[in-house]
Amino acid sequence: MNWDDDTEATAEADRLVAASADGEDTAVEAALRPKDLGEFVGQEKVRQQLDLVLKAARQRGATADHVLLSGAPGLGKTTLSMIIAAEMGAPIRITSGPAIQHAGDLAAILSSLQEGEVLFLDEIHRMSRPAEEMLYMAMEDFRVDVIVGKGPGATAIPLELPPFTLVGATTRAGLLPPPLRDRFGFTGHMEFYAPEELERVLHRSARLLDVEIDTAGAAEIAGRSRGTPRIANRLLRRVRDYAQVRADGVINREVAGTALQVYEVDGRGLDRLDRAVLEALLKLFGGGPVGLSTLAVAVGEERETVEEVAEPFLVREGLLARTPRGRVATPAAWAHLGLVPPRQGGSGSSGQQGLFGA
Ligand SMILES: Nc1ncnc2c1ncn2[C@@H]1O[C@H](COP(=O)(O)OP(=O)(O)OP(=O)(O)O)[C@@H](O)[C@H]1O
Ligand SMILES: [Mg+2]
């Protein structure tokens, strides 16, 4: 089993720009979740495809095919699973891979499903092996074998299940065994959101939270939200606090910008840790290449924290590259911190090339 994302979650926990949910998110997210496909912002492809899958099933009066949703944390997988149930007019049962360690746990859930019910299985890549194998048969034949007894006397009692729709969610589609992946009729890959889409999310959330925000204010927050609605909504709540205490309650560009400066989230969504990593790389190591361990010591963080918490976003933003010789800053990193890269030594003609040569 793969438990390695636990370290990441702990190290991430106290960050304002963490993509994973914290306690406060969990409390307010239910209120901010779009309730149907029409309200769900962005993800045009997945939305259109899903719309067809669900409409066709409804027309046939059938249960929808199993759906797999994959994508980074906070992009709307849980939200979409609830929308699927709502669109099908079906009840939804919510559980997760780590909660199902024994095949028996899964058998209990499956055998109590109603016809047409949506079973949402979050973090499906973290299910135990025996449960996974039981799921294969349940998905394909709507049947499970319940094993009674132990050893040579054990018998398998077949149990018919009502047709149901499994909606699996994973942040790591690559970790799913192919036989499991193949049993989904439809796979939706969730992408990071464009700034304009996040602006729409923000205007909608502001309306629900009853706070006034103008176009420029929403744009300011959207640009710092790392392509992720969950982060956009969290930043909105912090900016709302600032607007309430220090301004007249209205969120405009200046209020949003100043508030996020207070919380150390910069114009591109980098926080203190991200900037510390970049600054060390540029100022202490001339832009690299430098080894991960050295870089971690320089910023006073664990190796894993730098690698799993800070780097993925820096790489995605094209600010940092991981090369076989070590970590290297890109020209965009120098520009972002307002620094000038040192002239490369040697022939001169190798210039930038030297920075990226592996
Ligand atoms: N397309 C969207 N339109 C509007 N709001 C969205 C959208 N996607 C996500 N959100 C908001 O972002 C928050 C996080 O979404 P959600 O919980 O569905 O993410 P997730 O992909 O399930 O994350 P995780 O991987 O951590 O489980 C929710 O509060 C939801 O309101
Ligand atoms: Mg979720």
Image (cartoon, rainbow, N blue to C red):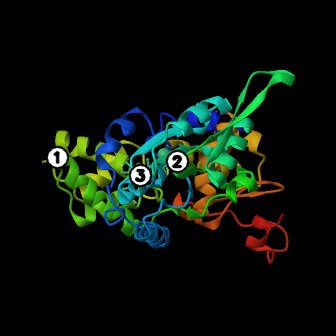
Q: Using the numbered discs, state the Cα–Cα distance from disc 2 to disc 3 in whole angstroms.
A: 25 Å
Q: Which residue is mark 1?
A: 247
Label number found at residue 57: none
Residue 282 visible here:
no
Q: Nearer the viewer, residue 163 or 199?
A: 163
> Mark 3 packing: few (<14 Cα in 10 Å), some, or many (20+)?
some
Q: Which residue is mark 2?
A: 162
For label 1, the SS is loop
Amino acid beneath label 2:
Pro
Please indicate whether residue 27 sits to the left or right of residue 318 in the image: left
* Quarter of the rendering occupied by the N terminus: top right
Q: Earlier in the sequence, mark 2 or mark 3?
A: 3
The residue that appears at 42% across and 45% down in the rendered structure is 92
Q: Using the numbered discs, state the Cα–Cα distance from disc 1 to disc 2 in whole angstroms.
A: 56 Å
Residue 15 visible here:
yes
For label 2, the SS is loop
For label 3, the SS is helix
Q: Which residue is mark 3?
A: 79
Amino acid beneath label 1:
Ala
Please indicate whether residue 329 sits to the left or right of residue 168 in the image: right
> How many numbered markers are drawn?
3
Q: Earlier in the sequence, mark 1 or mark 2?
A: 2
Amino acid beneath label 3:
Thr
Q: Nearer the viewer, residue 333 or 303?
A: 303
Q: Nearer the viewer, mark 1 or mark 2?
A: 2
Please provide percent x and percent y for residue 192: 50, 62
Please provide percent x and percent y for residue 277: 61, 46
Q: Residue at the right extreme?
A: 152
Q: Nearer the viewer, residue 119 or 203?
A: 119
